[in-house]
Amino acid sequence: MGNLADKKILIGITGGIAAYKICELIRMFKRNGADVTVIPTENALNFVTKLTLQTLSQNNVYVNEFEIPDYKPEHIALSDSADIMVIAPATANTISKLANGICDNLLTSVACAFKKPVFIAPAMNTNMWDNPIIKENISKLKSLGYNIIEPESGFLACGTEGNGRLCELSKIYDAAEKELTQKKKLAGKKVLITSGGTIEEIDCVRYISNYSSGKMGYALANEAYESGAKVSLVTTKVVTDNRFNIINVKSAEDMLNAVKNNLEYQDIVFMAAAVADFKVKNQQTQKIKKSEKTDELTLTLVKNPDILKTICEIKKEKNLKTKIIGFCAESENLLNNAKEKISKKGCDYLIANDISRADIGFGSDDNEVTILYKNGTAETLEKASKSVIAKEIIGRITKDE
Ligand code: CTP
């Protein structure tokens, strides 16, 4: 058995002339022990027959989502079962559908429901590949975490020379093999992530909080889990995800206790939560009533504990090996403020966020961050979805492990 034994690969084939080459790709995966299931589009079957694909893959070939042999809808069953999905050749049409969430056949529906890595190998005429609409869709897919294996230049089936030819099959094979066989970066590690804005009660019905959505923390939890870690998510948000140990908290005090209680067991702590700097001094247990005598209500706020600073001090005192990553939300002077913060808090890395921009940060699905390292260097990660940013952050902080 080859090194892909026990690995399940979905191969999506779309309607381009390069479809015939995928027969060889299936053989390469099969030779190395992989379990291959092929999903061609109706148009792909103009270039290669279902019988050929079935014989080479030694599996059923699925084309239509309405032929349901089982109780589970096919697009869900297929997308749950595989480790990776390869779409090759990917036509301009399928690329544009994927980039826009269109699910009008089994292949696009499976790809849309697929939560693990997807590799897309485009192949098309040069003018189509150069079309700005296709370029934009490719860059959208890249920023959402899809792996694009770029086409190559050469003789095209339409009789011209140019860019757009399906890349060498070995490139697709190697990319898939690397993904399937690499050791998971955080295998056996414990990772704790704080997430969401803390809730500081005024009375039993009112509170002070902030706009944090908890999306960045969730993306980190997801990525850490996919990288093999045991994940604890200390969150102020309602999260139902049984992959994580979820610890629900409200206030900064609660969060501090939860983090402190778990700190010694953690290899990595991400402090992604937006902790309120102040809490109400004279918090009321009963609802505060309006008064006939005055139109004003004065709340006195007192400082909350600084969780990040506290755990960095505990780490030092107890000589813990835990890597601590702080976050930093700034509306101006991002880099200067962040540099000051990393030394003040004492964390190993600081991920700085510009919260003055509406297109990233609080509530948004995207982010653009600058990672500050302890040695004073800074690196900006280009704007991308929070899941791509989470992947890059984890990649950077585990580089030397
Ligand atoms: N943080 C914390 N406890 C607090 C405040 C912040 O643990 N009481 C953490 C946050 O989770 C984040 C980092 O400290 O990882 C920086 O948070 P940020 O809000 O940017 O900075 P502050 O320390 O609150 O400073 P300032 O509000 O003055 O910018």
Image (tube, rainbow, N blue to C red):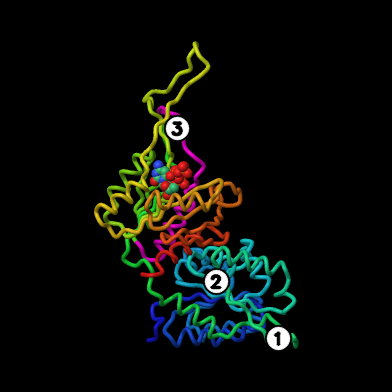
> Is 188 left, or right, of 325 in this rendering?
left
Q: CA distance from mark 2 to mark 3?
A: 43 Å
Q: Is residue 195 above or below residue 151?
A: above
Mark 2 and mark 3 in contact? Answer it, CB < 8 Å.
no
Disc 2 residue type? Asn
Instruction: Report the residue marked by disc 1.
Output: 156
Say which mark, if any, is on residue 147: 2
Residue drawn at x 28%, y 50% is 314
Give the percent coordinates (x, y) of residue 195. Answer: 43, 49
Q: Nearer the viewer, residue 376 or 218?
A: 376
Say which mark, if any, is on residue 81: none
Residue 274 in sight here: no
Residue drawn at x 74%, y 85% is 158
Q: Is residue 176 above or below residue 283?
A: below
Q: Is-magenta flag for residue 225? A: yes
Q: Nearer the viewer, mark 3 or mark 1?
A: 3
Instruction: Report the residue marked by disc 3.
Output: 207
Secondary structure under tag 2 reads strand
Give the percent coordinates (x, y) of residue 133. Answer: 71, 66
Residue drawn at x 49%, y 45% is 212
* N-term-proximal mark, 3 vs 1: 1
Q: Is-magenta flag for residue 144? A: no
* N-term-proximal mark, 1 vs 2: 2
Give the percent coordinates (x, y) of residue 51. Answer: 56, 84
